[in-house]
Image (spheres, grey):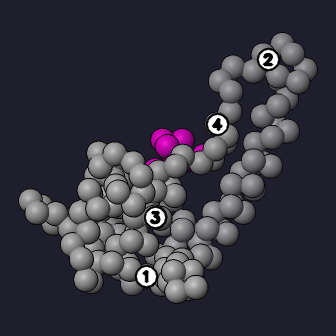
């Protein structure tokens, strides 16, 4: 199991917009050149961030802007915006058909479901503790070094 890369792509994009957006027009081509992905992926991710009301995107000539205070955007907000959990809203996808006639298959949900939910909740709690402002500050510090 791996968190889709669109999560880190979205973070990368938002850090660029936060750092460069005041002086430069941030287009999907500009973002794609930094992230190293096709501009189509950038546009899809921008659309998801816009739907989550984290950014605005100018039509035509382009340009993205963050519309919330950076302190008010957590990694959890970004994670949820790019739909990393999919339709199930669960981090761990369970295999579809454990054999009910097998002693392990019949009991695996009872053994794992609650534990996996607690793991997901702990991860989400940790994501909620880190703001975009913190990541922008950390990035600035590294650029200056």
- The answer for how far apart the CA atoms under marks 2 and 4 are is 18 Å
Kindly identify which residue carries mark 2: 100
Q: Residues within 10 Å of mark 4 (few under 14, many from 20)?
A: few
In whole angstroms, how far apart are the C-alphas of marks 4 and 3? 26 Å
1 or 2: mark nearer the eye:
1
Please report whichever mark, 4 or 3, sits nearer to the chain's N-terminal start: 3
Question: In the image, which disc is placed on residue 93?
Answer: 4
Q: Quadrant of residue 66?
A: bottom left
- State which region is magenta: 83-90
Numbered label attached to residue 12: 3
Residue 27's quadrant in the figure? bottom left
> Would residue 18 be counted in the magenta stretch?
no
From the viewer's perspective, is the residue at label 4 or at label 3 nearer? 3
Give the residue number, with chain letter if any, for mark 1.
Answer: 70
Residue lying at the far left of the rendered structure: 60
- Tell us which disc is closer to us: 1 or 3: 3
Magenta segment main secondary structure: loop
């Amino acid at each position: 199991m791996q968190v889709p890369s669109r999560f880190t792509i979205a973070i990368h994009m938002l850090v660029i917009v936060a750092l460069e957006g005041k002086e430069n027009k941030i287009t999907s081509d500009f973002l794609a050149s930094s992230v190293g992905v096709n501009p189509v992926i950038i546009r899809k991710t921008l659309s998801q961030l816009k739907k989550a009301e984290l950014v605005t995107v100018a039509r035509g000539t382009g340009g993205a802007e963050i519309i919330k205070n950076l302190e008010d955007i957590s990694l959890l907000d970004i994670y949820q915006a790019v739909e990393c959990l999919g339709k199930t809203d669960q981090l761990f996808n369970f295999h579809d058909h454990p054999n009910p006639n097998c002693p392990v298959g019949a009991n695996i949900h009872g053994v794992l479901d609650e534990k996996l939910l607690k793991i997901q909740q702990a991860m989400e709690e940790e994501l909620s503790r880190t703001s975009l402002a913190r990541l922008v500050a950390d990035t600035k510090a590294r650029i200056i070094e």
